[in-house]
Amino acid sequence: MNEVLIEGRRLRLRRANVTDLNYIMTLQFTPENLKFIVPFNREYHHAIIASDGSEKLDVIVEELDSGSSVGYFMLRKMDSPCVEFTHVIIGRKGLGYGREALNLLLKWAFEMKDFHRVWIDCKDYNKIVLHLYESLGFVREGFLREYLLTNGVYENLIVLGMLDREYFSTD
Ligand SMILES: CC(C)(COP(=O)(O)OP(=O)(O)OC[C@H]1O[C@@H](n2cnc3c(N)ncnc32)[C@H](O)[C@@H]1OP(=O)(O)O)[C@@H](O)C(=O)NCCC(=O)NCCS
């Protein structure tokens, strides 16, 4: 039985299960996604899926019409007031699914789960996702200089956050 977090106009967010592992691994290691994320291995995802889901969650973004998987997120630190969204990946790009899925995830986090704060990070040159995060209301909070070593090159990370009162003030 798939545990549904929330449904929207076109998409459903549901907890991943073992049958989603191939999809999650493929999405992470697709070159156009891999350059913007730090992938985890299959065992790591398997452990998240097998866990009680109280601290980390692997989430599948699914089209309501077709039932197909179109993206994947990971949530971390769910046992604190400050949840982290990470591994934001949409497989079917450019259809507005990223915006819709993140809006649903914010609604779930603040309206259904009462988190105080949501935070997220991205590489400083990931202009598409920076535009998306900021247009959703995330605020730039930090700049971690030369934080990630990728193929011998140190890369900068931008940290963004949204507080519950900021989320509710945009209604
Ligand atoms: C970033 C990502 C999640 C966005 O998902 P998406 O479904 O393609 O995005 P959407 O269609 O919802 O578009 C969101 C915004 O980005 C813009 N955008 C999307 N693709 C774009 C592109 N190729 N060039 C420029 N802008 C683009 C859209 O115009 C839209 O902005 P707008 O509403 O102001 O017009 C997706 O591209 C992705 O998986 N990228 C690779 C992994 C990644 O970078 N993850 C983030 C890690 S922090």
Image (cartoon, rainbow, N blue to C red):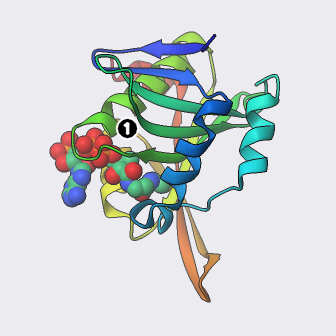
Q: Is residue 55 above or below residue 150?
A: above
- Disc 1 target residue: 137
Viewer-side residue, 90 vs 140: 90
Q: Tell me if I can see residue 7 in this picture.
A: yes
Q: Residue at x 55, y 47 (%)?
A: 120
Q: Position of residue 45 (x, y in %)?
A: 72, 43
Check the picture and name the quadrant holding the C terminus. top left
- Give the quarter of the image for residue 97: top left
Query: In the displayed structure, does residue 141 sit left or right of residue 152?
Result: left
Q: Is residue 150 above or below residue 93?
A: below
The amino acid sitting under disc 1 is Gly
Check the picture and name the quadrant holding the N terminus. top right
| Furthest residue in direction bottom, as rendered | 152
Q: Position of residue 131 (x, y in %)?
A: 30, 52
Q: Tell me if I can see residue 141 in this picture.
A: no
- Give the quarter of the image for residue 10: top left
Q: Position of residue 80 (x, y in %)?
A: 77, 30
